[in-house]
Image (cartoon, rainbow, N blue to C red):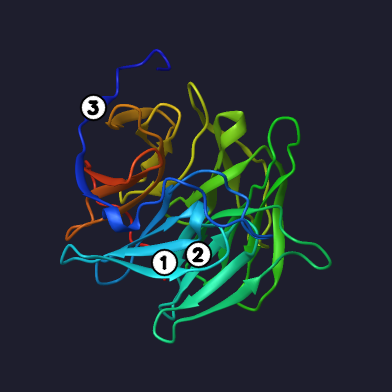
Amino acid sequence: MYGLDAPAIIVPELVFELPVAFRKDAPGPRSPTRTSKGGTTLEGPCFDSEGNLYFTDVPHGRIFVARTDGTVELVLEYGGEPNGLKFDSAGSLVICDHHLGLLRFDLVAGQLSSLCRGPEKEHFKGVNDLVFGRDGALYFTDQGGTGMHDPSGRVYRLGPDGDLRALVTNVPSPNGLVFNESETILYVAATRSSSIWMLPLTKAGGVTKAGIFARMPGGGPDGMAADVAGNIAVAHPSLGCVWLFNRKGIPTHRVLGPSGAHVTNIAYGGPDNDWLYYTDGTSFGIWRARMPHPGRALTY
């Protein structure tokens, strides 16, 4: 890849499989807010402050938690299509739902509410993934059905004051996203162009001189996560693996997936935060791999 030294191979291990009682091979009930056609598809891994792993089943509108004691529980089931997850500063789950926009789920009260359905007088195309900044602003991708035929995917910033701003409006299928250490650059997975975009952020909250950070072989990137050394881990569904890119956009490591895997999204976790967990969209399993550096602590 890139004609440089071959990336080091990291072999993962299976952490757990979704209990049989929770597996669904058929699509969920049809509704105006649910259009996915497949069976259970795991996505959106996200750890809480106690080390419990939350994840989604997109086609069936379900959110699960795998607790540190090894038990798996159904946390929420509703008529939507949840994808990316992150915890906010209040300890609630913020959900990117393809049809319902940004949602907030209060785990204590068991209450699901709408956070943002779209810009004024319009709905989102189909939000996908999200990340919080240190200032409390929420950055997220609006992917919908965009691609090279329709490069109109957007990346938004939702400020703590509720101000919604589109940072870019021309991404072919924006997906996962992650900051650099200083939060001066936002990296965005542009799935349909098989590349990772680099969005330098201005002090005024805009974007300048956007460019390509890295290109992917054989299909586009999905979820992303960063480590303390400035490396970026990128899920690669079509090749069933995770790449680790250094600051210069060169792949240094490759985390393998099981045969036929469709690696959808990733998150750092474990006691020392140096395990990379990933969801596999073709099975009911969640895998993990020990990485060279711990993941960067998320902003809550």
**What residue is rendered at 34% in x and 41% in y?**
283
Instruction: Say what amino acid the circle numbered 1 marks.
Output: Thr
Instruction: Identify the image quadrant of the N terminus.
Output: top left
258, above or below 116, in the image: above
- For label 2, the crowd category at 10 Å Cα-Cα, with few meaning under 14, some 14 to 19 and many 20 or more, is some
226, above or below 76, in the image: above
In this figure, which residue is indicated by the disc labeled 1? 299
300, above or below 255, in the image: below
Q: Is residue 9 left or right of residue 244?
A: left
Q: Residue furthest right?
A: 121
Most foreground residue, 95 or 224: 95
| Tally of marks | 3
Contact between marks 3 and 2 (CB within 8 A): the answer is no
Picture quadrant of residue 234: top left
Q: Is residue 267 left or right of residue 113?
A: left
Instruction: Say what amino acid the circle numbered 3 marks.
Output: Ile
Q: Residue furthest bottom?
A: 109
> In the image, residue 142 lies at what x, y percent?
65, 52
Label 2: state its secondary structure.
Answer: loop
Q: Which mark is residue 9?
A: 3
**What residue is rendered at 71% in x and 52% in y?**
125
The span from disc 2 to disc 1 (Cα, nearest Å) is 6 Å
The span from disc 3 to disc 2 (Cα, nearest Å) is 32 Å
**What residue is rendered at 23% in x and 42% in y?**
291
